[in-house]
Amino acid sequence: MKGKWAAGIRPRNFCWIMKDRLAICERPGGRGESHRRVRRTEEINWIRQQGFSRVVSLMPSTHNLHNYSEQNIAWSHWPIADNEDYRARLGPLFAELQSLLVSGEKLLVHRRALDDVVCGFVAGYLLWNGMVPSESQAVVVVEKMTERPVGAVGRRIVNSAAALPGPEDRLLAVIEQEQESAGDD
């Protein structure tokens, strides 16, 4: 592939959450009726050219995953439904996201559209990680970054994230458990 198309095209609604580390967008190729195979290929090429090491799909379905494999892009599938018990799911996902970022991965998170689930997920992660101090600030930060409102589903996700122990709390719990185990010996 030569010329300007060699670099591919930027996915729709692309937005950095953490510059050069964590970004979000609409599913490469578009959504539903407007999904186009050629566009998907061009957008996945852009993702690879930009140095993303992993794509994280929050879609309930497995659409596009084999296309990432074909382009030698690592992927993770963390399906999140519009209506579920977010508190039960978010803790392990945030911990895995944190681990990937700490290990130096450059991540792109998407769903069929840049919707409340994606925006709520990243706002919840920012809150859980301590990068923003409150639910309302997490929502405002993501609304400003994405230039779109975070609705009821996204706010429910952020609210669920607020109820989770943060990474420091989890570390303290592990240390306390290890100390208790050492005391029993």
Image (cartoon, grey):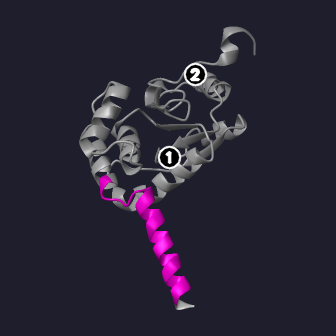
- Circle 1 Cα neighbour tier, 10 Å, few/some/many (<14 / 14–19 / ≥20): some
Magenta span covers which residues?
162-183
Q: Residues within 10 Å of mark 2 (few under 14, many from 20)?
A: some
- The residue at 45%/67% (across/down) is 172
Q: Which residue does the image show at 45% across and 36% down from the upper left?
A: 112
Question: Where is mark 1, residue-wise?
Answer: 61
Looking at the image, do the residues carrying marks 2 and 1 touch, with CB atoms under 8 Å apart?
no
Screen quadrant of the C terminus: bottom right
Q: Which residue is mark 2?
A: 39
Whether the magenta-drawn stretch holds residue 99 is answered as no
Q: Using residue 145 as the reference point, say whether residue 110 is left or right of it.
A: right
Task: Single out the residue that lies furthest toward the bottom.
Answer: 185
**139 horizontally vs 94: left or right:** left
Residue 84 shows in the view: no
Magenta part, dominant SS: helix
Secondary element at tag 2:
helix
